[in-house]
């Protein structure tokens, strides 16, 4: 693939990310993959058709740090809360989850947006002709 544009799609299963601790774990794994591969990455929240309420909550967490920390504080305390909240802040500082894209392969929700994002990254937004 030398000379071709490459993009990582990091899939985050909505069911696996439905708790704040699991969301942070998956976000850290995503960051590790991106560091290792050194490629642009699109974090994709997958299987959103299976858990609509969890999807809404995860999207809200990714956009509202105060809400995430409030939810976290109800489940964790002390050193555990401090660790998770500091990890979340560190990930936010490097822009993780800002572009979290919810998709469903079953309903095809957001596939056009995903293709557009891939195109934007891989071709710098320019349409190519064959």
Image (cartoon, grey):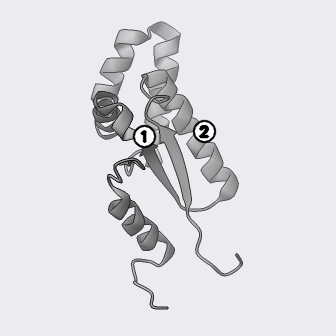
SS at mark 1 in the image: loop
Q: Is residue 37 left or right of residue 48?
A: right
Question: Dividing the image into 4 quarters, which one contains the N terminus?
Answer: bottom right
Residue shown at 59%/69% (left/top)? 6
Q: Position of residue 9 (x, y in %)?
A: 53, 55
Q: Position of residue 34 (x, y in %)?
A: 61, 52
Residue shown at 47%/8% (left/top)? 78
Q: Position of residue 12 (x, y in %)?
A: 49, 40
Q: Single out the residue that lies furthest toward the bottom.
A: 130
Tell me: residue 78, above or below residue 98.
above
SS at mark 2 in the image: helix
Which residue is at the front of the view, 127 or 36?
A: 127
Residue shown at 36%/14% (left/top)? 73
Q: Position of residue 35 (x, y in %)?
A: 64, 51
| Mark 2 or mark 1, earlier in chain | 2
For the residues labelled 2 and 1, the Cα–Cα distance comes to: 19 Å
Is residue 96 visible from the viewing direction of this image? no
Q: Is residue 8 left or right of residue 61?
A: right
Tell me: residue 61, above or below residue 123.
above
User: How many numbered circles are shown?
Assistant: 2
Badge 2 crowding class, 10 Å Cα cut-off, few under 14, some 14 to 19, many 20 or more, is few
Which residue is at the front of the view, 85 or 71?
A: 71
Mark 2 highlights which residue? 29
Q: Which mark is residue 31?
A: none
Residue shown at 45%/87% (left/top)? 128
Mark 1 highlights which residue? 47
Badge 1 crowding class, 10 Å Cα cut-off, few under 14, some 14 to 19, many 20 or more, is many
Q: Single out the residue that lies furthest toward the front.
A: 106
Q: Single out the residue that lies furthest toward the top.
A: 78
Tell me: residue 100, above or below residue 80.
below
Which residue is at the front of the view, 1 or 51?
A: 51
Q: Residue 88 occupies which quadrant of the picture?
A: top left
């Amino acid at each position: 693939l030398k000379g071709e544009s490459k993009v990582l799609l990091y899939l985050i299963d909505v069911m696996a990310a439905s708790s704040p601790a699991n969301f942070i774990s998956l976000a850290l794994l995503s960051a590790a993959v991106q560091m290792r591969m050194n490629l642009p990455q699109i974090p994709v929240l997958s299987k959103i058709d299976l858990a609509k309420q969890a999807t809404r909550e995860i999207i809200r967490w990714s956009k509202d740090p105060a809400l995430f920390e409030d939810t976290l504080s109800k489940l964790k305390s002390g050193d555990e809360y401090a660790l998770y909240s500091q990890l979340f802040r560190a990930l936010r500082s490097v822009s993780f989850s800002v572009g979290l894209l919810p998709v469903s392969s079953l309903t095809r929700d957001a596939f056009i947006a995903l293709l557009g994002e891939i195109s934007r990254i891989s071709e710098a937004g320019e349409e190519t002709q064959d």
